[in-house]
Structures are given as C-alpha cells and as structure tokens.
Image: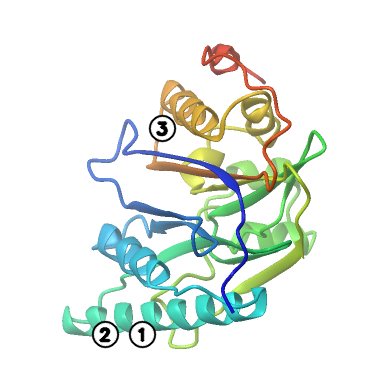
Amino acid sequence: MKNKPRKFECGAATDTGKVRLENEDSYLVQPETGVWAVADGMGGHEAGSLASNVVVDALRKIAEPVSVTDLLTRCRERLAAANRRLLEIAEERGGIIIGATVAALLAFEGYYACVWSGDSRIYLVRHGRIRQLSRDHTEVAELLAEGVLTSEEAQTWPRRNVITRAVGVHHDLDLEVSQGLLQKDDLFVICSDGLTTHVSDDEILDATRGETPQGACDALVALTNERGAFDNVTVVIARYAPHGSTIVFAQPAHAFAQSEHG
C-alpha cells in the first residue's frame, strides 16, 4: 500500500555563522517519504561535518512507508546503521569520537513522530503557541530537571554544552521519541543549537507568524547572524497543509529580525 498524499509547505536554511570556519550541520527535507531532519556534527571533535552527513544520508535512504509505525521503524534502523558506520570510521581513525546530534520529524497521513538524540530541537507551533516537543539531552538539562540548578544558574553553568546522547558515540544508540496527531496548519521547526543559543522560543514563534516556511527559515538564520552566530545554524520548517494553508503570508520584510527581545 502506498502512502496517501500529504501536503507540506517546507523551507530550510543553513549558515556557517560568524565564528566557525566550516559548517558541520546537515539537513534533510524529504516530504515524499515524510522525513525532515537536522544533524549537528559534535563541536570540538574531528570530522563533525562527516558525522552529520552520514546521519542525514542514512535518513535519506528511507523508502516509502506503509504506516507511521513502519516509518518510525525505518528511521530507527537507518539511525542505528549510521551509528554503526560512525563507530567504524572512528575506529579506523584511531579511536577518535565522530558523532552528531539528530532531530527528525516523521509524518504519515494524519500522524507525526519526533525522533532525536542530543540537543538539536523540534518545536510545534499550533494555534498561535509554540511548544518544544524534544527534550535536550545535555548535562545542564538533566540538572535542571533534577532541581540541582535554577534556570538562571544554567545560563552560566560551565558544562552547559555537554551532550549526553548522540549518534556515533556509544554502541547502543539511545533515541527518544514523541508522537501525536497532525492538525491543519501545524508548523514544525527543526533546528540545531546554533539557533537556540541566540534566539528565544518566543522569537521563533514571532518569525513564523504570517511567513512562508522558507521566509521564516531565512529570517531566523539572519537574526542569528546579527547576534554573532557563535556556531553553525540550521533551520528546517514544515507546515502541514493537506488542503492548502489558511495562513495569510506577509511580504518578505522580516521586520522582526531587527528587533531585540531582552
């Protein structure tokens, strides 16, 4: 049985940023199989761009699914294959760490699933509100959840960028999954931490209001660059519009990109 037609309006943008010399992010926009993803090569390690490309190439090979469960199974299998491949490459290169975070959105008919490992994020914008669907796999996020740190202390915690999960780091790949039902005009934002270092959730929401997915992606990357872009930045947006969008799109002025929100 073939996957029934879906309609998604998509956009994507990536940039090396103002500090890094190489873009170690990779992304995938593949609505024909219902897969969108962002992978971020682990900063500070060798071959980050290789790692993110291995992850995205694995997801690109997902064939047309027959159900959301089938799609999720295929995604897990491809990421497990990417994990094995990165471990093999690491061993060939003398045991160095070659890893990448991943955040993937899967969609089939009226269902979606989010799959992630690391601190790349997936947001859902629905009825004018934004909600983070993924949960950061970082030391600081765990300490916040345990009540060891306050949100203010977390901002300056010296190990706040330490990732606790990623593809290519451990033999047993640890993925987290969240699933739900799609609603018309649901908008998903998938991004590397290069965006969320500089741009707040509310600003991400503001960027999507009245904008096409591509326009919002371009504006968010531009805003990140305006604020210094310490890391590579990648944004992928997919809006579910099975019978056409009801959103009235603005002209590409991106006035919000000039604003500063505390």
Residue annotated with mark 3: 229
Q: Is tag 1's residue or tag 3's residue first in the polypeptide sequence? A: 1
Mark number displayed over residue 84? 1
70 or 233: nearer the eye?
70
Marks 2/1 in contact by CB < 8 Å: the verdict is: yes
- Residue type at mark 1? Arg
Q: Are marks 1 and 3 in contact (CB under 8 Å)?
A: no
Q: Amino acid at mark 3?
A: Ala
- Residue at x-position 52% and y-position 71%: 165
Camera-side residue: 192 or 36? Answer: 36
The quadrant in which the N terminus is found is bottom right
Per the image, the residue denoted by label 2 is 88
Residue 141 in the image, given as x and y percentages of width and height: 66, 58
Kind of element beneath mark 3: loop
> What element does badge 1 sit on?
helix
Crowd tier of the residue under label 2, counting other residues whose Cα lies within 10 Å: few below 14, some 14–19, many 20 or above: some
Which quadrant of the structure image shows residue 89?
A: bottom left
Left or right: 94 in relation to 73: left
Q: Residue at x 17, y 83 (%)?
A: 92
For label 1, count other residues whose C-alpha is less than 10 Å away and answer few (under 14), some (14-19) or many (20+): some
Above-or-below relation of 73 to 235: below
